[in-house]
Amino acid sequence: MKMPSAVRRLPALAALGGAVLLVPAGVSAQVCIGSPNSPGQYSITGDANITSGANDFGIGVEANFPGPLGARVGVSVDDFDEDDRQTRFEGRVSYDLLGGSGSGVSVCPVTGADFTRDTREGLSTNLLRIPLGLSVGGRANVGDGISLVPSARAGVAHRRLSGDLLDTTETENSFFAIAGGTLALDDVHFRAEVGIDSADDDPFYRLQIGYRR
């Protein structure tokens, strides 16, 4: 059986994730998921998700609650025309196992759900994806209020596909890996991520700009 090209890239992406974590650490927050938010802080984000099939653009809110818990919610739409529309809702929670120990490193189990509804020519397809993974990140303060937040995570995802063209709900489990980095400047941050999923042949990318409060 031919192995998907995304799976063949897993070792390289894991090595990339490990390499970017070898950075001098500063103060730890929810850096496990690449968030520069301090405890009690939240960000409003603009997001661009780029895949081989479609690109979508949206907004989100990421919060680092006092204590070890972090969360994100977001919604995005694709760049199809008026007759074809893809809408995606996402939610995510993470829990810092090190509890902001001050080491500059954060390790978090991460889970959540993505729901995507794809409508073309009046026919709809629904995809529910539930990931469960482990994420590791670090923070390096480089001076003048600027910090770098590299992170990497990997895990499994359960997918359920249903719609007007399917007689039954199709289910599938896949493996995923994501690595990225955040550049944080005072109240604004920029983030880029690249990821792979064994259910897809091509990688996916996310670009984000956020404003922290």
Image (tube, rainbow, N blue to C red):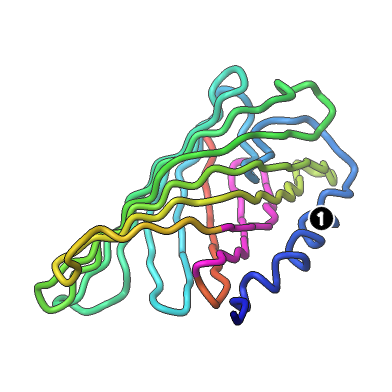
Residue 181 covered by magenta stretch? yes
Q: Nearer the viewer, residue 106 or 9?
A: 9
Instruction: Tell me which segment is drawn in magenta.
Output: 175-199
Report the residue at 54% width, 77% height from top. Answer: 201
Q: Is residue 20 left or right of residue 83?
A: right
Q: Quadrant of residue 193?
A: bottom right
What residue is drawn where x is 68% and y is 39%?
A: 32
Q: Is residue 19 left or right of residue 65?
A: right
Outermost residue toward the front in this view: 1
- Quadrant of the drawing holding the N terminus: bottom right
Q: Is residue 205 above or below residue 154?
A: below
Q: Of 201 and 93, which appears nearest the observer?
A: 201
Magenta span contains residue 149: no
Mark 1, residue position: 20
Q: Position of residue 167 (x, y in %)?
A: 17, 66
Residue 199: % across, % down:
50, 67
Q: Residue furthest top?
A: 67
